[in-house]
Amino acid sequence: TPLSLIRNFSIIAHIDHGKSTLADRLIQACGALTQREMTNQVLDNMDLERERGITIKAQTVRLTYPAKDGKTYILNLMDTPGHVDFAYEVSRSLAACEGSLLVVDASQGVEAQTLANVYQAIDANHEIVPVLNKVDLPAADCERVKAQIEEVVGIDAEDAVEVSAKTGLNIEAVLEALVTRLPPPKGDAEAPLKALLVDSWYDPYLGVITLVRVKEGRLKKGMRIRMMSTGVVHNVDQVGVFAPRLTPMDELGPGEIGYINAAIKTVADCNVGDTLTDDRRPADMPLAGFKPSVPVVWCGLYPIVADDFEKLRDSLAKLRLNDASFHYEAETSAALGFGFRCGFLGLLHLEIIQERLSREFNLDLIATAPSVVYRLWRTNGAMEELHNPADMPDGSLIERIEEPWIKATIMVPDEYLGAVLTLCTERRGIQQDLTYVGNRAMAVYRLPLNEVVFDFYDRLKSVSRGYASFDYQMDTYEESELVRISILVNQEPVDALSFIAHRSAAETRGRAICAKLKELIPRQLFKIAIQASIGSRIIARETLGAMSKDVTAKCYGGDISRKRKLLDKQKEGKKRMRQFGKVEIPQSAFLAALKMD
Ligand code: GTP
C-alpha cells in the first residue's frame, strides 16, 4: 500500500466518553465485521473489560475505507485506555500513530483525562481531530464544549465532528476527517528495517504475538529479525494484520501496523519499545522507544496453596509480557510463605492484575497492603528505596524518610467543589491553583501519593456523586514523619497487614483497621485480641468474642442436605483462609482491611 493511502490513528478520551463505542462504529462502517460478528464492543475483548466497561489493553484494528475522493484507504485504529492508571498504554499507542481522534462527551465537556491524554498526543506530535460524541443526549451542548476545548486544551475546535456513536449519526464524517485531516505516515521502503515493538502478548495457540509498527524498510515472512536492545535473533514465521482477527500477509511496509509471530519462547526477549531490524542488513540506530514505566504502588501476592507458587511464577511472566508496566520479583513473608512483590501503576491496575490472575490463570491469591515507594536514609548515610513495610528498619537506624508527592488535577462541578477541597485537605493536600472552566472548577493540588493510593479515587467519586475527574503526575520526594503500624492478631504480628502511614494518621487508621478486622475475621472458639502498634506501643485494640462450636446447630430439624451444604460451604471457606498462630484470617480481609470507608 502506498504511504499516501495509509492513516494511523489513536482514539483518546476521558473514561466513558464513548471511545470504544465509536471504535465499534468505525469498524462496522468499514464492514470489517458482519452484524453477527459485532458482539458488544469488539475491541474490549477481555471479559474483565466487558464487565467493567473499561478498556485496559490498547487494541488495534486495520480497516479499509473507500473515501469520497474515490481512493481506498487503510486506516489503522489503536484504541487506548482512558483510566489514569493506564497512561503508559496510551503513550505506546500514540508512538505508533500520526494522529488522534480526541473524543469529548458533548454533555460532559473536557475532563481531567481528556487533558492528560491530549497533552500526551501533542507531545507525540500528533495531528488532533476533535470529535464531540453523544450529541443525541438532550444535555449535549456542542458550542460550549467547543469553546472549552479551545480554551483549556488550546486546539482549534471549530471543525470538530459532531457525532453520536450510539445512534451512528455522522460516523462517515469521522472517516472523512481521518483521511483528509491526518497526515500519512513517512518512511522509506528500501531502507534497512526499523520496526517499533509496541506490545506483545501470549496466545495459547500461537505463543508470543508481537504488535509492531514498521517505520522503515519491509518486514517479511521468513526474514531473520534482530531485537536491537538485546541482539537476540528470530525467524519470522508469520506476518499479518488485525482485521480485526489475525490475518496473515506476505509483508508489512513502512507506515503499517501489524503483528509477527516468531516462535519467541522466552517472554523476556520481547521488550516493549525495542526496535526490530533485519539481521542481514541491520539499521545503525534504534528508534526512540518509550520512557520506561515506573511502578508507584507495590504489594505482595502470595498463593493460598503453597503448591501454586510455580504456577504463579509462570502466570506473572505471561502477564508481564502482556503488560510492560507491571513489575514483579520473588519475596518471602513470615506469615505467607513464598510469593512475589509486585509493582503497579496504581490501585486499579493492581485490582485488574489480581482479577486476571484469578480468572485467566485460576489462582487463589492473597494480596498484602499496597505501599508506595519511600526513600529511606539510614544514619550511616545510605539511601534505599522502601516499598515493603516489612523491610522498614528499627527507628534508631533511620535518619529520615521521604515520601512521593503528586501533582493532581481535579475537575468538578461547582456544587461539589467544597466537598472535594475538604477531601484534599484531609489527605494533607496543598492547593496550587483553582480556576474555572465554564461552571466547572479545576483545582490543582499537591498531595502525598500515600494518601491517594488506597481509596482517594473512590472517595472523590463518592463526594462528587461521580462528577469529579482526576488525573495526576508524580512530582517530588519530600521528608515526612512516617511510622510503621503493625497489626497483631492474638498477639501474633501479621506481617502482611503492616503498613506505613503519616504519624498524624496512624492512630485513626490503626483503629479503623482493627475495627474492620473485627468484622471480617470469623469468630473463633476462643476470644482474640486485634491490636495495632507502633514499635512496642499499642495504639488501638479490639476484642473478638468467642463463638459456639457447631455451625449447623442453628439448622435444627432434620434437613440433612441443608446441613451438608453448610458444611461444604465452611470447607470451601477454609481453603481461602490463612492460619495465623491459632487464628484463621479470610483472604478477603486483607485488601478489605485497607480499603477504608
Ligand atoms: P473506556 O473504554 O472505559 O475508557 O470508556 P469508553 O470511552 O470506551 O466509553 P464507552 O464506549 O464504553 O462508552 C461509555 C458509555 O457511554 C456506554 O454506556 C455507552 O453506551 C455510552 N455512549 C457511547 N456513545 C454514546 C452516544 O453517542 N450517545 C449516548 N447517549 N451514549 C453513548
Image (cartoon, rainbow, N blue to C red):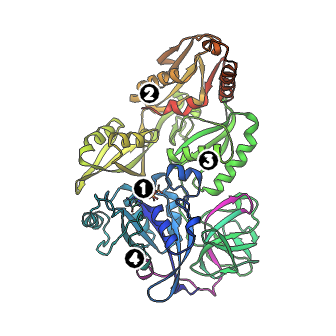
* Discs 2, 3 touching: Cβ within 8 Å: no
Which of the marked residues, 2 or 1, is nearer the chain's N terminus? 1
Give the amino acid at mark 2.
Arg
Give the amino acid at mark 3.
Arg
The residue that label 2 is drawn on is: 509
Taking 444 as reference, is 290 left or right? right
574 shown above or below 439: above
Residue 338 spot, x, y in % from top left: 70, 36
Which of the marked residues, 1 or 4, is nearer the chain's N terminus? 1
Disc 1 residue: CB within 8 Å of ligand 1:
yes
Label 1 or label 3, whichever lies nearer to me, is 1
* Discs 4, 2 touching: Cβ within 8 Å: no
The residue that label 4 is drawn on is: 173
Residue 561 spot, x, y in % from top left: 69, 22
375 shown above or below 168: above
Question: In what quadrant of the picture does the N terminus appear?
Answer: bottom right
The boundaries of the magenta stretch are 178-207
Give the amino acid at mark 4.
Ala
Q: Which label belongs to residue 6? A: none
Which of the marked residues, 4 or 3, is nearer the chain's N terminus? 4
Element class at badge 2:
helix
Taking 409 as reference, is 282 left or right? right
Q: Quadrant of ligand 1?
A: bottom left
